[in-house]
């Protein structure tokens, strides 16, 4: 009887274990399906989540379920529900469970971000890592990467670069990652390279952006998704740099790969970016066809960002053709789409374009409302480009409807903003040029140093060879002398009668030795004379070069022909070493780069017109700049004019 009961118990436990295993298997099956569709089909994701709920048993299962529910509600913009799901999920896992805790932190930060609490979103993640709540370097790198992207969205690129460095630090902590890198490590490493490229892309450092995008592609070109992302980024930069043909080659290859797969958001991006490439080349018809493709696919995928931007571009195309009704329809369609994702930059641009369309249609009030709406979104974006668009739209409105004073005011604002944009671009170009110049200068110095070292080595080698030659010759002569002497002694003993002949031979040998020694002395003197001549020639050449280099007329001619301001300022300060330090003693503040350049041109005696020709501004602008500069210099009362006073400073 006992055996029967034991058998029944065993069967029960086996059945229970089998059933539990089956339940767990089904739970993770639906969990996997949920994560496959969460980005593209929210209805399916909700269905899989409901089925998943039926099979959870353990605390970890329940934690995973509520985290999935939190993710789905976040995607559906049900933020209060998502927060509640997160509170429930926390009951089933501890902070020691780093995988689930990291997922919770990530989602909680994203919710804060969507609600507009940008600082809190970043601080939540940074506090957790500063307190050491997460130890796993990959999990930490992942959260730092989220903070990095948040800073990019806020256009805080310095902080973004700092976060990128932290990601690198975390990924380099475990050396085993490099030897046998897991998939998450490879993905984070590639993502970080792409993020660095994006940061440099946004600050218009396109060469650096291209470098990081190519490095990201070369890191793992076998991954089909990431390789396409990298190629897309490379193509975008090439298009911005004006290398349309090379960009076109990348886009064709990208589209060939993407069109062979199921349509996705990457294909919509590719269509849109390819269209922009054609637009920049002036191929309006082809550009419009690809904008329509991106519009259709984005609408099908419910991808509002590209949908809204594509509608705007189509509308702008109709506006350029004079089809104002069609332009109005497409521009108005883009606005609610972009409002769903709160894309401030796109909405600012859309309302500016709508204002122009309405103004041309004679709808004054509607045009004014549109441009004021653009101003509201501009204040959220707060970039020079957005300000330029809005001030230009206001100018066009008041230029059409008056008053003219308002039109003039907004025209000034628009021009000032555009000048600021150009100034930023010029400063970036100047900084890049300075770095390039300093690098080339250092390379030239290194090259000269290498040549000098090489010449010194050659001279030392030649002297060593000459020394060895003469030592060998002397040694040979000494050996020969000894040989002759010994031979003479032997012959003296053997043939006494030939003593006179032997003495003559010895005398002859002495003469040869003396002659050779004289020739050796003469050769040494010749070498010394040649070295002195070479040294004198070098000194003469250096004096000539120095005189030419420090010749102001040479400096002016160099400036006029090369237009290399960085090199010009370096040469100027080499000639007039105390000029700026003397000016600074009597000035009310430091000089900007533009002011230093103006002072240098005044010092060289250029007229207002010549200065205007060199720095590409009007003669009146030169006069105004001089006037501001003379006030800053605090020129003492004297009989000299301000310009003459500056020229007399050494």
Image: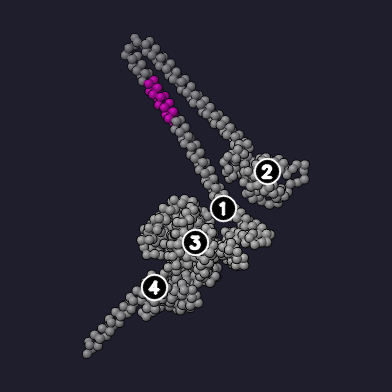
The residue at the point 54 percent across, 70 percent down is 116
- Residue 382 visible in the displayed image: no
The residue at the point 43 percent across, 76 percent down is 69
Label 2 – label 3 distance at C-alpha: 48 Å
Which tag, 1 or 3, sits closer to the chain's start? 3
In front: label 2 or label 3: 3
Q: Looking at the rendered structure, which numbered label has been put on residue 536?
A: none
From what the image shows, is residue 616 above or below residue 300?
Answer: above
From what the image shows, is residue 311 above or below residue 549?
Answer: below
Residue 63 picture quarter: bottom left
The residue at the point 36 percent across, 74 percent down is 30
Label 2 – label 1 distance at C-alpha: 26 Å
Label 4 – label 3 distance at C-alpha: 36 Å
* Nearer-the-camera pick, 604 or 96: 604
Would you name the residue on which mark 3 appears? 314
Which tag, 4 or 3, sits closer to the chain's start? 4
Q: Looking at the rendered structure, which numbered label has been put on residue 34?
A: 4
Label 4 – label 1 distance at C-alpha: 46 Å
Which tag, 2 or 3, sits closer to the chain's start? 3
- Residue 271 visible in the displayed image: yes
- Mark 2 element type: helix
Q: Which residues are magenta?
A: 464-481
Mark 2 nearby-residue class (10 Å; few <14, some 14–19, many ≥20): some
- Mark 4 element type: helix
Which tag, 2 or 1, sits closer to the chain's start? 1
């Amino acid at each position: 009887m006992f055996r029967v009961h034991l058998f029944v118990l065993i069967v029960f436990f086996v059945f229970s274990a089998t059933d539990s295993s089956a339940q767990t298997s089904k739970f993770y099956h639906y969990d996997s399906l949920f994560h496959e569709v969460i980005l593209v089909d929210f209805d399916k994701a909700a269905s899989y989540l409901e089925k998943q709920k039926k099979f959870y048993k353990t605390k970890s299962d329940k934690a995973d379920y509520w985290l999935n529910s939190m993710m789905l509600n976040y995607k559906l913009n049900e933020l209060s529900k998502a927060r509640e799901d997160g509170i429930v999920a926390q009951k089933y896992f501890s902070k020691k469970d780093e995988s689930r805790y990291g997922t919770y932190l990530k989602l909680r930060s994203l919710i804060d971000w969507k609600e507009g609490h940008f600082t809190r979103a970043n601080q939540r993640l940074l506090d957790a890592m500063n307190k050491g709540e997460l130890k796993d370097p990959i999990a930490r790198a992942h959260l730092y990467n989220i903070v990095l992207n948040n800073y990019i969205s806020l256009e805080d690129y310095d902080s973004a670069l700092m976060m990128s460095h932290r990601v690198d630090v975390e990924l380099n902590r475990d050396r085993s990652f490099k030897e046998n890198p897991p998939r998450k490590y490879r993905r984070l490493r590639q993502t970080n390279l792409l993020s660095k490229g994006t940061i440099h892309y946004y600050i218009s450092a396109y060469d650096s952006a291209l470098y990081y995008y190519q490095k990201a592609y070369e890191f793992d070109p076998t991954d089909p998704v990431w390789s396409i992302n990298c190629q897309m980024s490379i193509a975008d930069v090439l298009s911005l740099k004006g290398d349309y043909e090379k960009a076109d080659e990348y886009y064709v290859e990208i589209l060939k790969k993407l069109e062979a797969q199921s349509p996705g958001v990457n294909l919509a991006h590719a269509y849109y970016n390819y269209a922009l490439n054609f637009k920049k080349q002036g191929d309006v018809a082809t550009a419009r066809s690809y904008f329509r493709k991106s519009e259709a696919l984005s609408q099908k995928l419910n991808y509002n960002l590209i949908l809204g931007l594509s509608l705007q571009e189509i509308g702008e195309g109709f506006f350029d053709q004079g089809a104002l009704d069609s332009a109005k329809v497409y521009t108005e369609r883009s606005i609610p789409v972009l409002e769903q994702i709160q894309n401030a930059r796109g909405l600012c641009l859309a309302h500016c374009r709508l204002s122009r369309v309405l103004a041309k249609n004679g709808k004054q009030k509607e045009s004014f409302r549109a441009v004021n709406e653009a101003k509201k979104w501009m204040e959220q974006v707060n970039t020079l480009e957005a300000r330029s668009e809005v001030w230009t739209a206001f100018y066009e409105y008041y230029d059409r409807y008056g008053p003219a004073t308002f039109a003039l005011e907004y025209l000034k604002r628009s021009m000032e903003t555009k000048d600021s944009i150009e100034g930023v671009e010029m400063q970036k170009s100047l900084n890049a040029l300075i770095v390039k110049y300093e690098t080339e200068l250092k390379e030239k110095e290194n090259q000269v140093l290498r040549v000098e070292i090489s010449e010194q080595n050659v001279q030392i080698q030649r002297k060593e060879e000459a020394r060895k030659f003469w030592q060998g010759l002397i040694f040979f002569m000494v050996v020969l002398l000894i040989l002759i002497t010994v031979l003479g002694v032997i012959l003296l003993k053997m043939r006494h009668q030939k003593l006179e002949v032997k003495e003559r031979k010895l005398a002859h040998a002495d003469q040869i030795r003396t002659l050779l020694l004289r020739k050796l002395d003469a050769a040494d003197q010749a070498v010394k004379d040649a070295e002195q001549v070479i040294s004198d020639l070098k000194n003469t050449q250096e004096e000539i070069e120095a005189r030419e280099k420090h010749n102001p007329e040479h400096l002016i001619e160099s400036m006029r022909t090369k237009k290399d301001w960085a090199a010009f300022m370096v040469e100027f300060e080499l000639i007039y070493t105390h000029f700026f330090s003397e000016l600074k003693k009597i000035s009310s503040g430091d000089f900007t780069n533009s002011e230093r350049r103006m002072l240098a041109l005044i010092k060289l005696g250029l007229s207002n017109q010549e200065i205007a020709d060199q720095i590409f501004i009007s003669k009146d602008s030169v006069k105004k700049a001089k006037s501001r500069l003379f006030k800053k210099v605090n020129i003492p009362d004297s009989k000299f004019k301000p310009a003459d006073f500056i020229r007399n400073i050494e």
